[in-house]
Image (cartoon, rainbow, N blue to C red):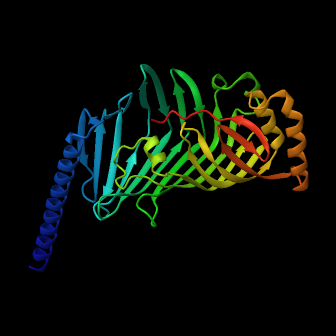
Amino acid sequence: MRYIVLIGAVIALMAAWTGAWLYVTGQVRTAVEAYIDEDITGWKINYKTLRIGGFPFRIKIDVQKPRLVLSGKKWTVRWETNHIDAMRNLWQPRHVLFDLTGQHQITLNRAGQTHHLMHDNDLAMSSIEIDEEGRLRLLSLDITSPELEFDGKGAAQGKRLQIHARRNPNSVRNVDLALRGEQIAISEIFLSRNLNVLWREIQLLDLNTTVTGLPDDMATAMLASQWRDGGGTVEVRQLRLQWGEVDITARGSLALDERMRLIGALTAQIKGHEKLIDLAVATGGLRDGSVIATRAVLGLLAAAGGGILSVPVRLQDGQLFLGPAVIAKLQPLALD
């Protein structure tokens, strides 16, 4: 009799758990389909099939042929891939893991011109957490062996790329953003002949920032010019760049001017600054008449620092100043 009662209790518990799982999966399907069908200006999602599984402890969503189209007045961006897997544990309803492994196609149309980007990887995982009010709290993306093609030509590839975004606890309009890339090789197609050997591979890019002035609702579309006009800035807490024979660490603040060019000020420590001068000459940022003076001034400053150039960096009026020397011209950023 005792065993019969125990077996009955187990069966009842399994039935209750199965019912709860089916109820939750039904709610998830309804929420996903409602979100996809929601009429959001400039935002359209569709897919071929959507399957839900993961019993007994998880909710797993498999989406085949998803497509996202974002559109503005003068531009359209279309993203599509073969499939995406999303998974969450029943006891962690606000934490979702995404498997983005595989090939992703992005089509950009701006001012009548169309470009095609193709991203591929060996492994790509993303983690998203939301708070009690449904707002994004944390987003992480980890990609192994990323490769990028632009209009059918190899553009770049790397060993690993990581991106982390976290809503700053001090303000809902600030986001802490971190980016780390390892062994990023840039195709010679996108480099001038003078840069092919010296500047083809970035050994390390490690960037930690806080982006201020974002909208309260992170899902709201926002033009870069609106962000600029609202006083938005990028506070660079730490930048580490190892590129060729140059090793740079820097921190400071950046924004956009009225012509959508970068402005701001940083403090930097640079090892191998001579190669930066070579880069400026190769790209036309430094003219022949100022090269000798620039080398002399920066050389003296580096010698005073034991071979490490500690210097203020200014971005102003479309020019990049390394100490007193102008080493590059800054072009407007096409972000709107």
Residues 86 and 294: in front is 294
The C terminus is located in which quarter? top left
Across and down, in percent, residue 240 comes to 68, 51
Q: Which quarter of the picture shows residue 159?
A: top right
193 and 146: which is toward the camera: 193
Name above or below for residue 278 compared with residue 256: above
Looking at this rendering, what residue extends furthest in the bottom direction? 2
Task: Identify which residue is drawn at 41% across, 19% down.
Answer: 112
Residue 264: give x, y in percent of width and height: 63, 49
| 241 relative to 160 in the view: left or right | right
Q: On screen, 16 above or below 5? A: above
Query: On screen, 243 above or below 77?
Result: below
Residue 276 appears left or right of 151: right
Q: Which residue is at the front of the view, 211 or 94?
A: 211
Residue 145 relative to residue 316: left or right: left
Count of numbered badges drawn on the protein: 0
- Which residue is at the front of the view, 318 or 312? 318
Q: Residue at x 74, y 27 (%)?
A: 284
Q: Position of residue 276 (x, y in %)?
A: 78, 39
Q: Position of residue 203 (x, y in %)?
A: 69, 43
Can you say which quadrant of the picture contains the N terminus? bottom left
Determine whether, in the image, residue 217 is placed left or right of residue 258: left
